Image (cartoon, rainbow, N blue to C red):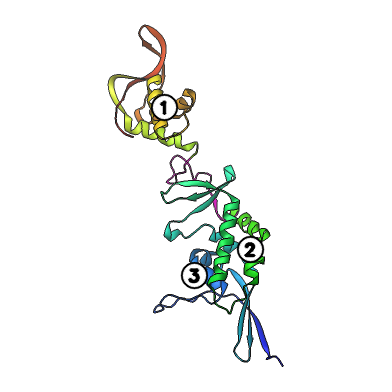
């Protein structure tokens, strides 16, 4: 005759105590919550779990339902360690912050692989009280992995100005990189000096050199003009002139009383 068993549903989180040392997780929820405390604080227990206990002290833990919000938040990483993954909605593109602090593109498929790897690692590291079937099979399925990443699009969505020219966040490629360089060009390489003239062609040539040094795409002179004209006007209070004369040739564009300096930017 089999011993009588008792079952109950639980939402388990590891309990932190002041004098406790490193904690050993006993359930899948505890394992994930200890690894990703930020996600646990925001979204609660990673799993709904069923505890099955027998009168002779035998215990089995079954993860029966997954918290998609927690798993989606988990993909964002641990902010205390400098981890960051964001979904940039204007481009429908995922980005992760690399060790150099620069955001680089990644894909939904790679995030799904990361999610599946974490669930498998959880199953491998937990003790024998946890039933591993759901972890290994159901919760690592393509259906669940895609659902987690799809939910993460809203949870990890970055604001439209996340990669703006004035933002502290930098990515390896993006239209704002030219605007950032243009700001540095105006602020660090230009100065006000009476009697000097800065020709648009010379400014564009120097800016193009800086762009190539940074392995950025060269932009058209018209696009460069659109970037620097308002910046120079704001910085020095002068407008772009269209009536300058060079070597008896009129109609040359440039700025009066502005000088291009040499030096690093």
How many C-alpha atoms fall within 10 Å of the one at disc 2: few (<14), some, or many (≥20)? many
Residue at disc 2, secondary structure: helix
Q: Is residue 5 magenta?
A: no
**Which residue lies at the image location 57% right of the left edge and 64% below the top edge?**
70
Mark 3 secondary-structure assignment: helix
| Residue underneath mark 2 | 140
* Residue numbers of the magenta segment: 154-172
Relative horizontal placement of residue 195, taking residue 59 as reference (left or right): left
Residue for badge 1? 208
Vertical order, 167 against 241 (above or below): below
Q: Quadrant of the C terminus?
A: top left
| Image quarter of residue 212 | top left
Residue nearest the viewer, comparing 216 with 195 = 216
Q: Quadrant of the N terminus?
A: bottom right
| Crowd class of label 3 (few under 14; some 14 to 19; many from 20; radius 10 Å) | some
Question: Going from the N terminus, do you reach mark 2 or mark 3 first?
Answer: 3
Dominant secondary structure of the magenta stretch?
A: loop
């Amino acid at each position: 005759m089999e011993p009588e068993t008792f079952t109950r549903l639980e939402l388990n989180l590891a309990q932190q105590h002041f004098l406790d040392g490193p904690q050993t997780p006993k359930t899948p929820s505890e394992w994930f919550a200890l690894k990703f405390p930020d996600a646990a604080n925001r979204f609660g227990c990673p799993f709904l779990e069923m505890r099955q206990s027998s009168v002779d002290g035998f215990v089995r833990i079954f993860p029966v339902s997954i918290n998609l919000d927690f798993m989606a938040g988990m993909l964002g990483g641990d902010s205390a360690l400098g981890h960051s993954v964001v979904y940039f909605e204007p481009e429908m593109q995922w980005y992760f912050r690399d060790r150099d602090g620069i955001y680089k593109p990644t894909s939904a498929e790679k995030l799904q692989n990361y999610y599946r790897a974490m669930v498998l690692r959880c199953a491998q590291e937990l003790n024998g009280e946890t039933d591993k079937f759901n972890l290994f099979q159901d919760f690592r399925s393509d259906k669940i992995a895609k659902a987690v990443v799809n939910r993460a699009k809203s949870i990890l969505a970055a604001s439209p100005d996340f990669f703006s020219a004035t933002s502290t966040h930098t990515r390896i490629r993006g239209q704002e990189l030219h605007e950032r360089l243009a700001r540095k060009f105006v602020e660090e390489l230009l100065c006000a000096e009476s009697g000097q003239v800065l020709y648009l062609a010379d400014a564009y040539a120097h800016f193009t050199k800086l762009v190539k040094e940074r392995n950025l795409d060269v932009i058209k002179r018209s696009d460069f003009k659109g970037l620097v004209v308002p910046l120079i006007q704001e910085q020095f209070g002068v407008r772009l002139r269209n009536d300058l004369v060079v070597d008896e040739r009129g109609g040359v564009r440039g700025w009066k009383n502005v000088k291009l300096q040499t030096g690093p930017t």
